[in-house]
Image (cartoon, grey):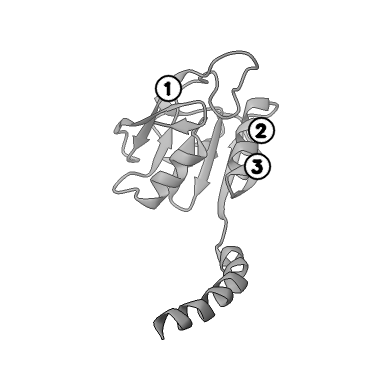
């Protein structure tokens, strides 16, 4: 009896599964980038391919609005992305953003210092991706290592 009910339920589950997938909202990021910076647009493409909706505004690093991520000055990147109360600075891979948003704890964001070769938006044909550190920060000036990445893959 149980097997017969299961056999009947499977086609229904398959029929309705596209609706369930489409019903999941995409995460939105409001992104600020230095005008003319092409690596920022590469990062945006990476984030969009990972399922985020992204809006992009051109703002110089010196723009006071750029400080909204809560990142310490040492971690400010060429682009800043905001999602609710959370901020992401620089070439943070989408996998790290998703992992962080699933369990942020007391932290308010992530950052990648500099422009590591091979990080999202910084890919160079024929050059191996560097291993780099992703930092988390709490908005009060405290930051610490969170996870390492190579290219767009977190380790």
Tell me if 11 is positioned left or right of 97 in this view.
right
- The residue indicated by pointer 2 is 41
The label on residue 56 is 3
Q: Of the residues under marks 2 and 3, which one precedes in the sequence?
A: 2
The quadrant the N terminus occupies is bottom left
Q: Quadrant of the C terminus?
A: top left
Graded by Cα atoms within 10 Å as few (under 14), some (14 to 19) or many (20 or more), the crowding at tag 2 reads some
Q: Residue at the location (60% across, 28% down)?
A: 121
- Mark 2 vs 3: CB contact within 8 A: yes
Check residue 149 in the rendering and tell me which mark sits there, or answer none: none
State how far apart marks 3 and 1 are (Cα).
25 Å
Q: What element does badge 1 sit on? A: strand
Q: Residue at coordinates 60% horizontally, 33% vertically from top-left?
A: 43
- Side of 55 relative to 6 (left or right): right
Indicate whether 107 appears above or below 119: below
Calculate the distance from the C-alpha at mark 1 to the C-alpha at mark 2.
20 Å
Q: Judging from the image, what secondary structure is the residue with disc 3 in? A: strand
Q: 123 or 5, which lies in front?
A: 5
Closer to the chain start, of discs 3 and 1, is 3
- Is 38 above or below relative to 3? above
Q: Residue at x 62, y 34 (%)?
A: 59
Closer to the camera: disc 1 or disc 2?
1
């Amino acid at each position: 009896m149980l097997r017969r009910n299961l056999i009947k339920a499977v086609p229904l589950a398959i029929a309705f599964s596209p609706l369930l997938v489409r019903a999941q909202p995409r995460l939105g990021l409001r992104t600020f980038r230095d005008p003319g910076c092409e690596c920022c647009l590469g990062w945006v493409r990476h984030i969009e391919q990972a399922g985020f909706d992204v809006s992009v505004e051109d703002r110089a690093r010196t723009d006071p609005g750029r400080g909204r991520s809560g990142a310490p000055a040492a971690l400010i990147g060429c682009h800043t992305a905001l999602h609710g109360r959370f901020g992401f600075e620089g070439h943070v891979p989408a996998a790290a953003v998703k992992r962080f948003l699933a369990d942020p704890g007391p932290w308010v964001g992530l950052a990648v210092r500099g422009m590591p070769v091979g990080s999202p938006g910084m890919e160079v044909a024929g050059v191996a991706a560097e291993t780099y550190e992703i930092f988390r920060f709490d908005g009060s000036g405290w930051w610490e290592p969170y996870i390492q990445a190579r290219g767009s893959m977190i380790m």
